[in-house]
Image (cartoon, rainbow, N blue to C red):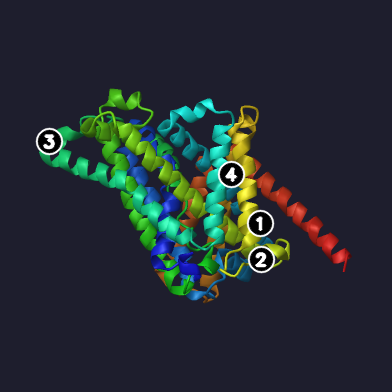
Amino acid sequence: MERGRGLGFWGATALVVGNIIGSSIFMLPAVLAPFGANALIAWGVSLAGAGCLAWVYAQLSLHLPAGAGSHGHVKMLLGDDTAWLGSWGYLLSVWTANAAIAVAGVSYCLTIMPGLEQWAFAPETLGLLVIVLLLVANLRAIGGSVQIVSTLLKLIPFVLVIALGFWLFIDHGDAALAGMSQQAIAWEPALASVGITLFALLGLESAAVPARAVRDPNNVVPRATLTGLLLAGFVSVVATCIVAFMMPAAQMANSSAPIADFIGRFMGGGAGLIVAIFAAISCFGALNGWLLVGGELTAAMASTGGLPSRAAERNERGAPVVGLVSCAVISSIFLLLAISRRGAAAFEFVALLSTTTSLVFFVICTLAALKAWHGGRLPKTRSTLFACIGALVFSMVALYSAGVESAIWGVGCIAAGYVWRRISLARRNASR
C-alpha cells in the first residue's frame, strides 16, 4: 500500500496492469501467430467482453458502499453463501496462479544466472525467497510501491517492441507483415484464439477485489479498473500482434522466446538476456499483486464470518497479517509441488482449476450486478444492462473455452470447500 494509507489511483492502476501483464504474455505471440487475422478478431471480442466486465466492477464500486469490495457487494445482493462460493473459488485461482507465476519467474532467473542450477534446491529456495520478500513488503504496506515500480519496468520491452514495429511498418509498409499467417478467417480458429486472448486479460478485477486496501474506493476503483484494462489491453494487443505478424513464420515456429527473438533482430544476441531480466521482473511484479489480492480477499471473507475471524486482523499499517501469510504459505506449497519432479503432475492437475474457479467468481459478480440494476441500486440505463449481459456472455464463453474437464473439477473443488464451510459452521454453532 502507498505510505501505509492504502492504494491511490496509480497504485490501483498498477495492480490491474501488473496482474494482467504477467508471465504468459512473453509467449503469447508464438501461440497466436498460426491464427493470423483471426487473432485480431479474438482480441476485439475479448476486449469488448473484458470491457463489459470492467464496467460492471466499476459500477458496483461507484454506487455501492465504499470498501466492501467484490465479496461484500455479492454478499449484500445475493447472500452470504453465494458470496462465499464465488470468493472461495477465486482464492483457489489466486493460490495456484501465484505458484505458476513464481515458477515462471524462477525459470527466467535461472536463464539469467545459469550457474544456480548446479546448486541443490536452488529453484525452490529462490522461489520461496521471492515470496517471503514480497510478503514482507505487503506486511509493511509498501506492496503498492513495489507494484508501481515493477509495472513501469515490465512495460519497457513492450514499448520497445511497439516502437520497432511502427518503425518497420513506416519503413517497409505492408512488406513488414510478410510473416503473418495466411490462415483464412473462419469461425473455428477465431473461437479457438478467443479462448487464448480471454485468459490473457484475466486480472482486470484486481482493484475491485481488495477495495479495503484502496483509498477512496468509490472513486479510485472504477477509474483504476477501466484505465488499467485500457492500458494493459493496448500493450497486449499491439505488442503481441506486431511480433506475431512481423516475425518470419519459420523463425516463429522454432521460437521459445518470441519477444526476445524479435528484439534480438535489432539488438543482437544479448536481447534474450535483457528480456529474461524484464520477464522475471514482470513475473514477480504480478506475484506481488496477486499476493496482495489474495490477502485482502481472505480478510474480507473473514470479516463477514466466511473464514475464522482472526484472518481479518490487521497490523498497525493496515495490512491483513493472517490473510497475507496464509496466501503466501499456501502459494509456497503449490510452488514446491510444481518444482518437484514428483509433484509436477499433481500441480498441473490443480493449476487447471485456476481459470475455471476465477470465472465462476466473474459470473457470480455479474449476476449480483444484474440484481442491483433490477432493484435500482445501479443506474437503470441501457448501457449498464448491456454491460452486464456482455460480461455474463464473456464469462460463460471463457468457461466454455476452459474445457469440460476443468469445469467439472472446478465445480467439485468449490463444492468441497462449501461442504467444509457448512461443517465448520455447524461445529461453531454447536460449541456456543
Can I make out residue 244 in this image?
yes
Circle 3 residues within 10 Å: few <14, some 14–19, many ≥20: few
Circle 4/circle 3 CB separation < 8 Å: no
- What number is the disc on residue 151? none
Is label 3 or label 2 in front?
2
Q: Which mark is residue 85?
A: 1
Task: Work out whether mark 4 precedes mark 1 in sequence or the reverse, and give the earlier one.
Answer: 1
The mark nearer the N terminus, 2 or 1, is: 1
| Number of residues whose C-alpha sits closer than 10 Å to that of mark 1, classed few (under 14), some (14–19) or many (20 or more) | many
In the rendered image, which residue does mark 3 sit on? Answer: 172
Considering only vertical position in the picture, is 314 above or below 158? below
Could you tell me the amino acid type at mark 1? Leu
Q: Is residue 86 at least partly visible in the picture?
A: no
Say which mark, if any, is on residue 96.
Answer: 4
In front: label 2 or label 1: 2
Cα distance in 3D space between marks 3 and 2: 58 Å
Whichever of callouts 3 and 2 sits on the residue coming sooner in the sequence is 3
**SS for callout 4:** helix
* Foreground: disc 4 or disc 1: 4
Whether label 4 touches label 1, CB < 8 Å: no
Coordinates of residue 76 in the picture (x, y in percent): 62, 71
Q: Residue at 71% of width from left, 61% of height from top?
A: 307
